[in-house]
Image (spheres, coloured by chain):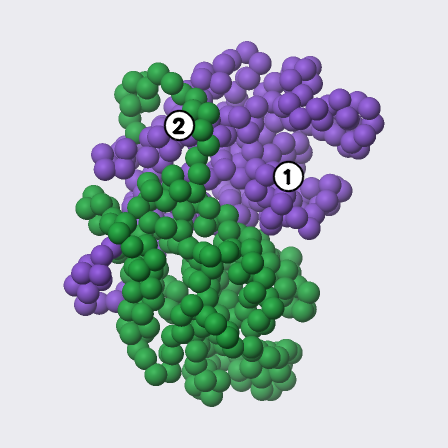
Chain colours: A purple, B green
Amino acid sequence: MGDSLVEKRNVYWHTGQVLRTHRENMLRQRGMVLWLSGLSGSGKSTLAHALEAELHALGRLTYTLDGDNIRHGLNSDLGFSQADRRENLRRIGEVAKLMLDSGVIVLAAFISPLRAEREQLRAVLGADYIEVFVDCPLAVCEQRDPKALYAKARAGLIPEFTGISAPYEPPQKPEIVVRTAEDSVAQCLAQLLAYINERTGGLEVSAARC
Amino acid sequence: MGDSLVEKRNVYWHTGQVLRTHRENMLRQRGMVLWLSGLSGSGKSTLAHALEAELHALGRLTYTLDGDNIRHGLNSDLGFSQADRRENLRRIGEVAKLMLDSGVIVLAAFISPLRAEREQLRAVLGADYIEVFVDCPLAVCEQRDPKALYAKARAGLIPEFTGISAPYEPPQKPEIVVRTAEDSVAQCLAQLLAYINERTGGLEVSAARC
């Protein structure tokens, strides 16, 4: 917006509120929350960041919420007790809801092991909550062990570690299942993109933004 | 994005991460947080929503954080004790930081009466924190009393009400001061728009989005 553009307009005050749908139309996309649930090492973050890069290249506005940007900031006051883990996910769900309202496609990558907590997220986010089960056998995750956490958990150094000493309750009716032990990253991405594309149906990004 | 577009691309996985600057370039704007501080009834929400409408009309992506969308969701577990008020603002600051990272222009309308708390916000948000002092004499705010809160506070029904029984510490070096008792909404808006325009300098919104 140049000065001229501001000056040319005589009316500065619109009484109508800007709603999510207005922002979505401006962005030519539909806001949604893809919630990636799965064991540590299943590939949630890898998929989220790869998907984000792909969507960005297609002109989509996305944001990835993960441990890196949540645990050091908003939830830096929380530990890993059951109550704190529940509060951790509750707050992330509420942030996702605000971002959704801003029109953004939110990618959330969190183990989120408990069915009841995921159902709570679905209740808060409604039809825009898209559960992605990042399905990968424990043995494969443990072999990958990218952060050497399984080794520590087996050595008893991390209490209540999901899959080892704390339960992971697999989603029963996820919107999407990706199988990272069987399929390549490219295949999983194609699957996710096809779903998003279907949901966003007909909202072409303008050439100017591609 | 059509199916054809997805299919035509052979590489699904980019290793490069999508950064704030990439999103900003796509949006053709710079993310920032306009933090409106002022007494109850000073005009913070009115200005925020009017500014949002104006920016939207100019093709800018904005989001307004205020009591309505924060107190019922993310901070529904907080009351109004000193500690809870501090935690309320801390969390809002962290949400604003995430949204800023998504490229959005965030408008935050909260009384935020204490200097120390606002300095904390500035520390968290850095150079993107733009303090807007919505300056209006208490007598005028009390006369407006849009939610009849001053009447209740004077009757002793609301403890620690800012301006009556709790302090409001005026910003000492705000980036912007708008005077809602002296200037019209249109004048205050023009002032805010000029500032944002200056900061966003040179990033014209494409015709396709206007």
Tag 1: amino acid = Glu
Q: How many marks?
A: 2
Q: Is residue A32 visible?
A: no
Q: Quadrant of residue B185?
A: bottom left
Query: Which numbered circle lies on residue B19?
Result: none
Q: Position of residue A2 (x, y in %)?
A: 22, 57
Identify the residue at horizontal 30%, vertical 46% (top origin): B28
Q: CA distance from mark 2 to mark 1?
A: 29 Å
Mark 2 lies on residue: A54
- Which residue is situated farthest in the top direction here? A182
Instruction: Classify A106 as above or below B175.
Output: above
Front residue of B153/A47: it is A47
Label 1 residue SS: helix
Left or right for A167, reference B103: right
Q: Which quarter of the picture shows residue B72?
A: bottom right
Which amino acid lies under the numbered mark 2 shown in the image of this protein?
Glu
Is B46 drawn above or below residue A137 in the view shown? below
Image vertical order of residue B38 relative to residue A99, above or below: below
First in sequence: mark 2 or mark 1? 2
Return the residue at label 1.
Answer: A117
Residue B156 appearing in the image:
yes
Identify which residue is drawn at 25% across, 48% down.
B205
- Identify the subunit bearing mark 1: A
Tell me which residue sits at (19%, 65%) in the image: A7
Q: Is residue A166 left or right of residue B121?
A: right
Disc 2 on helix, strand or loop? helix
